[in-house]
Amino acid sequence: MTLVAEDDERRVESAVEQIKRESGGLRGELAADLDDSGSGVSATSEQLLKFHGVYAQDDRDQRRALASEGRDLAHIFMARVAIPGGVLTSEQWLTLDDLAVSMADGSIRLTTRQAVQFHGVMKSSLRDLTRALHARTMTTFGACGDVVRNTVMCPDLAWEAEGAGVELARDIASRFKPRTTSHLEIFVDGERAASVTDEHDFYGDTYLPRKFKVAVASHHENCVDVLAQDLGFVPVVHHEHGPGYSAFVGGGLGRSYAQSDTFARLADPLAFVTTSQVSDLIALVVRTYRDRGDRTNRRRARLKYVVADMGIEAFRREIASSWPTPLVAAVPVTFGPADDHLGWRERGEQFELGVRVGAGRVRDDGRGRLRSALAALASSLAVGFVITPQQDLVITHIEESQREDVERILSDHGVRAAGDLAPLERQALACPALPTCGQALAESERVLERVVAELQVVAENAGVGRRPLQLRMTGCPNGCARPAVAEIGIVGRTKSTYDVYVGGGPRGDRLARLYREKVRLDEVDVALAPLVAAWGRDALAGESFGDFVTRRDLA
Ligand code: SRM
Ligand code: SF4
């Protein structure tokens, strides 16, 4: 099928659009593909699998050896579990723990969107894994694909307002989950599922042009990077309409080196809405995106390009024209620096403890046995868990009498307390990259510890080793660990080099700027040393690194 663009140039819709349309409610040949004896799936099924929360990958560490032996790729699958607001019970955590060991690579990978990923899953285990999740009211369905993704929420909201924030995240998840029962049929229980193929009207038979991301920030800090979202909500009080949210639209961080008209973008203020209007606003924006998003070029299909191309005023007018009452202007917000949610915190009669995970990888290894420690806590105490947007974990609902037990269990397993970590390590993020991510150009998670250690030396030498400094690293410019808004963003450029960005900030309201291109990994610290030294020497009292390099125009 061809589409006629406004400039009358005939443009062809992308192949994925046809796959979606002809999939019969995201079914395609998936069931047969999962049943056959091969270790991979067809290219069409790979696309449909994403909607079911599963990515077909291969172990890239093995590629060269297998190719030299003339053998096929080492097919593995990544399964992402959507967890609204990152909130989990201890029973759910124990299920995740069990699945990590029995069906994946032994790790639970916490993501920057408060979800969980299993890596290294074999095709033959996918159905058992999704069934086990379903039994504990968790699902991979809609965690990936061209739909509204897992809603991110500041962990403080899980506690504040008696959990009203979690309810909002869960409502969004349930309203925007695709209606098709194909997931139940193919992955969970084919017998029980009544067949539904007609979709929500805001999705239609081709769903959205691309993914759509929603976040809810807290009113006092921006750990969710609300301006990096397609649609972000910040709690405010309107002088006339009372409590509600300021909505921001059109953020996104991914770029492509191959396509110069792609860029990172911060969201613009859209409107003020009350809590009961949040999901209607999402539906309206999603509908507008469904119709206006680019379905010919997936690299430029996100909502941010619609907003950038139309201009925020025109976009707002379009939304206002379908909103049942006059659209109320967003209440201006000032963000506080992002909280890392680590360490102890009092919550009413109870306590919670934020534990640094390190690139989100919960596992047992030479550095400590975090996975076993968390399993021990989940099985012996009635605690809860909240995954943070910084890939860390908050242990919640701890009684005063249990605090010592919690600390002992963690330290017995070699888990370091947040207070023992330098700020640089506390805040550092990295995406998974190699060996699982098919888009990785360079290492990220596996070299984060080294980069942090080298940069820590630079910071110590400059006398700023104990000052907050935000480092985020990714293996490519897709920006999964949100380096584009970090004080220091290190972004894979080639197999052995990185682009270094500086000048974002802990408030998440400014994009970082390119400082050095194609820097070798072992020279990243050298490249940054002059800036860190200048910060140590010339910064104003309390001035963050990002604010300093921006004020001094050093990037
Ligand atoms: Fe991401 C694609 C991992 C958050 C922008 N992302 C991928 C894939 C699925 C690779 C692929 O397409 O083959 C990665 C899986 C690799 C692996 O082996 O696990 C991947 N993204 C991640 C996670 C796990 C990073 C992490 O360290 O936690 C995060 C999972 C989030 C979740 O639970 O849903 C993750 N990705 C993000 C974010 C940050 C955010 O949403 O807050 C971004 C930047 C914000 C944005 O969307 O602009 C992000 N990921 C991308 C992009 C660029 C999209 C774009 O349109 O610009 C891709 C590439 C794509 O979609 O084709 C991508
Ligand atoms: Fe993969 Fe790039 Fe995302 Fe890292 S930033 S996980 S390398 S897509």
Image: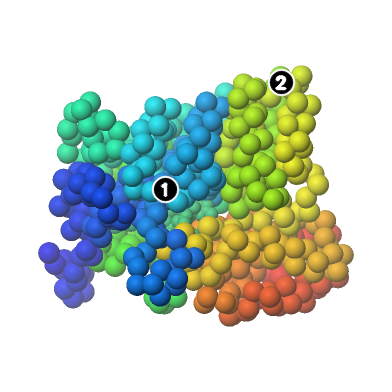
Figure check: 436 above or below 551:
above
Decide if residue 451 is on the left or right side of residue 391.
Answer: right
Residue positioned 33% across, 39% down in the render: 127
Q: Return the residue at label 1.
A: 121
Figure check: 189 above or below 392:
above
Residue positioned 64% across, 22% down in the render: 380
Figure check: 259 above or below 393:
below
Across and down, in percent, residue 208 comes to: 29, 52
Q: Return the residue at label 2.
A: 399
Q: Residues within 10 Å of mark 1 (few under 14, many from 20)?
A: many
Residue 521 occupies which quadrant of the picture?
A: bottom right
Decide if residue 76 is on the left or right side of residue 383.
Answer: left
What amino acid is labelled 2 in the image? Answer: Glu
Figure check: 51 above or below 394:
below
Pointer 2 or 1: first along the chain: 1
Q: For the residue labelled by badge 2, is the local secondary structure a helix, a strand or a loop? A: loop
Disc 2 vs disc 1: which is toward the camera? Answer: 1
Across and down, in percent, residue 198 comes to: 17, 39
